[in-house]
Amino acid sequence: MHGSGPERRTIFGIRARLATLAILLAGVSPALDLPSGAIAATPQPRQAATLQPPAALHLSVVDENGAAVPSARITLTPGQGAPVRGETDYAGRKEFTRLEPGAYSLRVEKEGFFAVTRMTVHVGETTAVEVRLNHVREFTEQVNVVYSPPAIDPVKTQSSETLTSEDIIDLPYPVSRDIRYALPMLPGVLQDSTGQLHIDGASTRQVYDQIDGFNVADPATDLFLTRVSVDALRSAEVAQSRYSTEFGKSSGGVISLRTSNGDNHWRITGTDPFPGLEDRRGLHVNNWTPRGIASGPIRPGKAWFMDAAELEYDQTIYTELPANADRYAVLRGSNLSKGQVNLADNNNLTVSLLINSLYSPHSGLDPLDPISTTQRYSTNAVLLNFKDQHLFQNGWLLEAGFQTSSFYTRLVPLGSQTYVINPNGTSGNYYLTNHGEGGRNEIIGNVFVPPLHKKGKHEIKIGIDIDRVSDYEQYTRNPYVVESANGVLTRSVSFTNAPPFTRFDVEEGGYAQDRWTISPRWLVEPGVRFDSDSIVQRAEASPRIASAFLLKRDGSSKISAGIGVYRDASNLDILTRSLSGTRTDSFYDPTGTFLILPPVLSTFTVDPNQLRFSIVNNASAALEQKLPRTTYLKIELMDRRARDIWSFVNPGASYSPTGPFSGNFILTNGRQDRYESASATFRHVFKQNHEIFVAYTRARALTNADFTYSLDSVLFSPQAGGPLPWDAPNRVVAHAFLPLTHKIDAAYTLDWRTGYPFTLFNDAEQIVGGPYSERFPTYFSLDVSMERRFTIFGFQWALRAGVDNITDRGDYSTVNSNVDSPEFLTYSGALGRSFIARVRLLGRK
């Protein structure tokens, strides 16, 4: 059985020569960043207007907790003459020089913040202004707030897309409590049947997952399993290309989640306080996902806290199973506790504790896998971090942080009876017991240098990150058998269990990056990164360069391009497969009595001395154009070529049904991947952040090594290439959030794409045809909702009703791809049409 994976089709070639455009990009002014708030001005003695020389004005932009806001867009408009524009640097500062004295209107804005629009600054009388911007909140005590609209960012060279807190809360998607189901609303982000995410053709193992700047991926597998309440997120950004050398060991992109902080206002919000009921074999609670956030001041103006808790209870009933063994439940919870204290005016400390827990007493239950074959499954994670940020008077900004995280997994079958696999279903008890513990201790440090002026302006940042990663595993595998549809033995599988093991890795990295503003319209960002670890035991350089150029002085048209070298982290899950034991497969004749060939022994061989870091060359270019009114168009081309990726090969195997059969799996650096894409994105923004978004992507994702062999999933075929499991040649994503009336909003999300490919195999665990040579049916999903806001007892509430998969299309996630099975090419796992309701407490009116 194969779960769904992206699809493939031929596509036009996009050459890495895009790199040459990286030097020819359009201009940008200093940094940017902004919300809305108050100002503090420093005056100087008034002089006679006719004698006043050109004046200077220093602006600093901070958020509601006093933290610097970089890259805020600033516009100074005099009574007469052209506006003067600029952006804040990494320390949230911007200095304007040679200004004509007089009254200027000041506007400061940055996406994700409320804009400051009503300030008047008297240049020549005032020398310094501090602007306080407030993060966008769904419910605010102020009536006349102004949103910072999306715009072409003059100092952004990175290729990325962002979901704001409004997008995450307002748009409908299948599992609205899990951010992993929201991110596929962005072009280039695809989700497989296990819930894992793939960015622009990359494996989920190649994606760097972070929350508030710290790595949260599983230490052993590099999978994105950590959960945090979606109500606590300020933004979710996906960087796909041209991203900073600050991010190492992340050739497939960066997923960056930012959570909210408390402020000087007491706030309590809640979502889904009432359980869902289902009348299936009696009335019962089938789903309950309450979430709540409390935040406020510990000491106003000095210290704040935020706590976001969520609980999930799901119960699924299968009427195909006996009434006393027809259901399984999942209980999951998470809690994020966060505090910030300003140790001094320019020094703030943030402490965060995230706890995850999940338990299911009958994991794996479905109509073909009865309750005896299920497992008791539990996972727990604890992540504690500290981050200190200090802004010195001379403009230097120092950031230092530490995180320790622990992950625990336990999988226990319900007994020790022999596990039996039959085309009509399984029986007995599951064969695998697992206890795993992973850990990561992470140190980060970043220094942001004050702007240097030499042939333009240079904003330099340098930093380090050091990780100690550990993986402890204990596996016990019992024998199991495979039968034909009429119950005749066709294969038996036995294992030699290895003792428990622990594997460590120490990863070290450092980088330097320069944001070089050559002119108000031309920005270049060169950088270099060095990485090493205790497994590969050599340092490797990753140079990168990106550039942006404004084609028009008003910033309405921009081209960006870049090329860079990216690398992947050493994966402990792959590295330790040689420590997990061996496997023996015995194949029987049609009577189930005699062996038809000698037993096949499967072993995994790993020689760390022969391994090296993978290397990925990523080149891309983009054109951004502002169309009439607040409409924006972006066209982007990308070419991503990877080599030296870790993969197992099976050199003694054959495609012949008669053998030879081989299970001698050897880890090499032989895998090569390639991804090419062209995309067009259209966005129209209305007032109050309502918008329409549509994107089309044409792409292909290919590899020369499609098979991921493991002791629990062997294939007695040689390694071979083809489309990657998440290859999707054509895809359209769209969403909109629109007002119907003063109090009612409507929203929809749409996802259409080519079906993911899958591989055919036979009873002998051999590939039939080429890897991933077949495809699932075309995928189409349309989710719609309406939400009304109202006030009861002095509190504002929001009530949503909607339909997921309103067309009731069968978007399958699983297929029986065994050519010897009577159920061959039977699709399953489709989520039909479902009606949803949601209640939210927004706050006191």
Image (cartoon, rainbow, N blue to C red):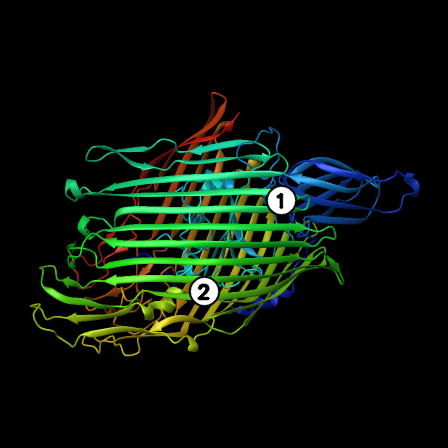
* Image quadrant containing the N terminus: bottom left
Q: CA distance from mark 1 to mark 2?
A: 33 Å
* CB within 8 Å, label 1 to label 2: no
Front residue (pair 471, 81): 471
Q: Quadrant of residue 37?
A: top right
Q: Residue at x 45, y 64 (%)?
A: 675
Q: Which residue is mark 2?
A: 675
What is the x, y in percent for residue 531?
54, 68
* Secondary structure of the residue carrying numbered label 2: strand
Q: Is residue 719 above or below residue 820?
A: below
Q: Nearer the viewer, mark 1 or mark 2?
A: 1
Residue type highlighted by circle 2: Tyr
Q: Which residue is mark 1?
A: 110
What is the x, y in percent for residue 338?
52, 43
Front residue (pair 384, 166): 384
Q: Residue at x 42, y 54 (%)?
A: 406
Q: Residue at x 72, y 41 (%)?
A: 130
Residue type highlighted by circle 1: Lys
Report the disc number at residue 340: none
Q: Residue at x 35, y 40 (%)?
A: 312
